[in-house]
Amino acid sequence: MADLSPTVSSISSALIGEAAKIGGNLWIDIEKASRFYVKAYAQALIDTARAVAAGEMTSGEGVNSAKAASFFFYMMIAQVTQQTLVAVQRFFDAVINALKVSINGALPFPIL
């Protein structure tokens, strides 16, 4: 059987490079967006509490407003989660493609 040690090393390097390329600025963007989402959610709750305290909103309206703010916050979390899942899927696709090329090229017959 062929010595696949160099192949393992080159595959590992390629996969790490692909992960960095696919992820790009995603994690930085998520961090920035998450800070914005948290601040917006907190501000919505503060605004609701102030409106109820000032009599501009009933307590029932305040509860509904807080529920709506929570709903929108959950939507933003779901959107960030979806971005992450898409990046992970791209990474897995790249891994499979890299393995196909490297492993199949190192063997006398393709197995992937």
Image (spheres, rainbow, N blue to C red):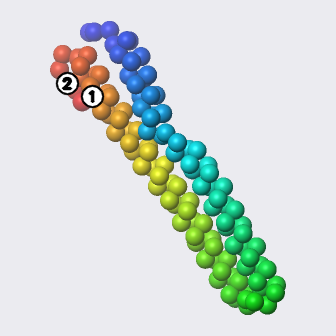
Q: Is residue 45 left or right of residue 8?
A: right
- Crowding at dot 2, Cα within 10 Å, few <14 / some 14-19 / many 20+, comes out as few
The residue lying at 43 percent from left, 22 percent from top is: 13
The amino acid type of the residue labelled 1 equals Lys
Residue 19 location, x and y as percent?
A: 45, 34
Task: Compare marks 1 and 2 and give the one earlier in the sequence.
Answer: 1
**Looking at the image, is 93 positioned above or below residue 55?**
above
Residue 69 position by quadrant: bottom right
Along the line of sight, the residue nearer the viewer: 105 or 24: 24
Q: Which residue is mark 1?
A: 100
Q: Is residue 33 left or right of residue 54?
A: left
Q: Quadrant of the N terminus?
A: top left
Q: Which mark is residue 89?
A: none
Position of residue 23 relative to residue 104, above or below, is: below
Picture coordinates of residue 45, whole percent (x, y): 72, 73
Under mark 2, the amino acid is Pro
Quadrant assignment, res 59: bottom right
Q: Which mark is residue 110?
A: 2
The picture places residue 30, in percent across and down from the top left corner, at: 57, 50
Q: How many marks?
A: 2
Instruction: Check disc 1 and report its element: helix, strand or loop.
Output: helix
Name the quadrant of the C terminus.
top left
Residue at 82% x, 84% y: name it: 53
87 relative position to 104: left or right: right
Percent of width and height locating residue 61 = 68, 87
**Crowding at mark 1 (Cα within 10 Å: few <14, some 14-19, many 20+):** some
| Residue at (61% x, 49% y) in the render | 31
Above or below, 23 relative to 107: below
Circle 1 or circle 2, nearest the eye = 1
Q: Are marks 1 and 2 in contact (CB under 8 Å)?
A: yes
Along the line of sight, the residue nearer the viewer: 5 or 97: 97
